Image (cartoon, grey):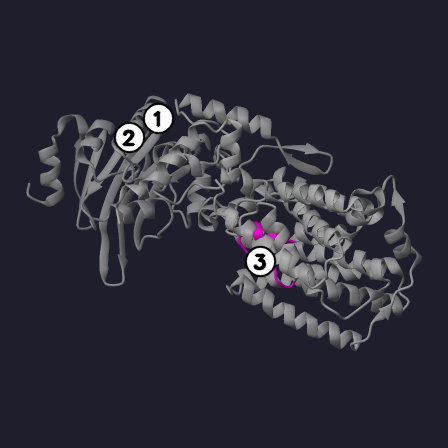
Amino acid sequence: MSGEPSSEAILACKGLSKHFGGVRALSDVSFEARRGEVTAVIGDNGAGKSTLIRCLVGVNVPDDGEIFFDGRRHPFANPDEARKAGIETVHQNLSLIDELTVVQNLFLNREIVRRVGPLALLDRPAMKREARAMLSRLSINVPSVSARVRRLSGGQRQAISICRAVGSGAKVVVMDEPTAALGVQETANVEALIRRLREQAVSVVLVSHNFDQVRRLSDRIWVMRAGRVVATVQSAETTGNELVALVTGAA
Amino acid sequence: MNNPADNAPVQKAGATEESRTSLTALLTDLSFWADWASVVGLVGLVIVFGIAQPIFLSVANLQALLLAAAILVVLATGQTFVVATSGIDLSLAAAVMLGAIVLGLVHAAGWGIFLACVLAVAATSAVGLLNGVLITVGKIPDFVVTLGTLSAITGLGLILSGGEPTMVGSPFLLKLTSGSFGPFGYPVWVAAGVVLAAHVALFHTRFGVHLLATGGQAESAHSLGIRTNRIKIAAYTISGFCAGIASLLLVARIGSAEPLINTSLLLNSVAAVVLGGVSLFGGRASILGPAIGALMLTALVNGLTLLSVSAFYQPLAVGAIVVLAALIMRYQR
């Protein structure tokens, strides 16, 4: 268990194991996501993708193994610690507050305030301005930053979740099935957004079921099967058939 | 089951969406009515009562109306904080009684009126704090907890007071209830101050946004590092604090501390919140809405009295209006 991950790695792990009761979810998994790249994790249901991600962002604590973040050994006891260190997770559903506006969601729990005497009041004009800038930097279209999130489409909501993660200054954005619940056009929009993140050198870890999507978006693909990493391939050098074979174990 | 008639309302709703700017669309848009129910209701009542009984619009009556509404406005403001977290505070009126009794007993013991007022507000705030802790740390449903404290502090009030009213003859409270600044009595200014402070807290501070986020989706808010339990405890404590302010106004108004619960204060506080467009599911609130809702309910009682309608009809009218308002709320966007 010696040896640090390569200096290109922003988020990595070595020898990670985790079991739930008698079920072995991860056995001796080593993984790394490189700085400024989109790293995909694929695998069948129950292959251990989600458990791996949950261990990396502090939702689950691994039984064994080491986690490295930004070149240093760095286990996270809970998601809050991971977020403070610079890892933002975009969950499929659990992220936006429907009744709040786009601005309020983008700045939730990191609101901009100005001091007025003894009071710290919200600086709403500044947040609106900043929110518009954040959205336009990623070319995200919403009717108005003052619109309630409830009235937006699934794709717009996902885009705002991603924008919030990036806007908090995250070094790594982890996305768990970001397009699973979206229609064709909305999926295309979110994919375009992920490409723009890559252009802006944001490191992304992408968990997906969709092999075509993974090949389109990522630099490197990690394939998991039955709790182990079975292959690492360059996205540019693989085919859909090869991925299917690796995932199912036919290769 | 899938006949064309089923689709018709959907198409209609879509059309309304597109032409929202036109006045007719606005007037047929139920969401508009839901958001502005209290204002529309108040304006409607003023017009109806003003025509039916011109005395209603006299300056003296309007001043009396505002004075009578002050207590309910303060309570509705407190209730709003709790409802915005998708909770409910059923112990509100009982807390008012406890505050009054503490005030009366401390004053009777000769400790001075200011200390008596401070201790009354402290007692009701403590009730709110207890509610919040039991609900969050104890993980007990809000209505069970506040129903429990409703009964417990009613009993406590009866034990402390021995079931007897205590006269509170204080020049300070007399001045508070009868004095005025400008056109309005002091209680009206107190209520306006509470409303202003609450509005700033809810819409211009981080606490306010976190409160609405907690009420909207507590789990999501928690996952973003918002301490939702603390927020909820704070909301119930604010509600208790408002009950304390209301108890001062009440004792000042009637001149004694009575071990009686005015249940209509509780029901009307919830009613004002619903009329004010605050979602009972949490996450969506307004302070001006419930304040105007409280004015509207007071205007209703005032107007019916001026029209010599028996007081027996008033709860019936309030109940009907609240259920109607709750129905309209379903169309809020």
Residue that carries the numbered disc 2 in the rendered image: A38
| Element type where label 2 sits in the image | strand
For marks 3 and 1, give the one nearer the viewer. Answer: 3
For marks 2 and 1, give the one nearer the viewer. Answer: 1
Instruction: Point out residue B184 in the picture as x, y percentages from the top left corner.
Output: 84, 43
Residue B111 in view (yes/no) = yes
Judge the density around disc 2: few (<14), some (14-19), many (≥20) Cα neighbours within 10 Å: many
- The residue depicted at 60 percent of the width and 70 percent of the height is B148
A184 on left or right of B33: left
Residue that carries the numbered disc 1 in the rendered image: A197
Determine whether A104 is above or below B19 in the image. Answer: below
Amino acid residing under circle 3? Ile
Amino acid residing under circle 1? Leu
Structural distance between the alpha carbons of marks 2 and 1: 9 Å
Amino acid residing under circle 2? Val
Determine whether A153 is above or below B233 in the image. Answer: above
Span shown in magenta = B79-91
Structural distance between the alpha carbons of marks 3 and 1: 44 Å
Residue that carries the numbered disc 3 in the rendered image: B88
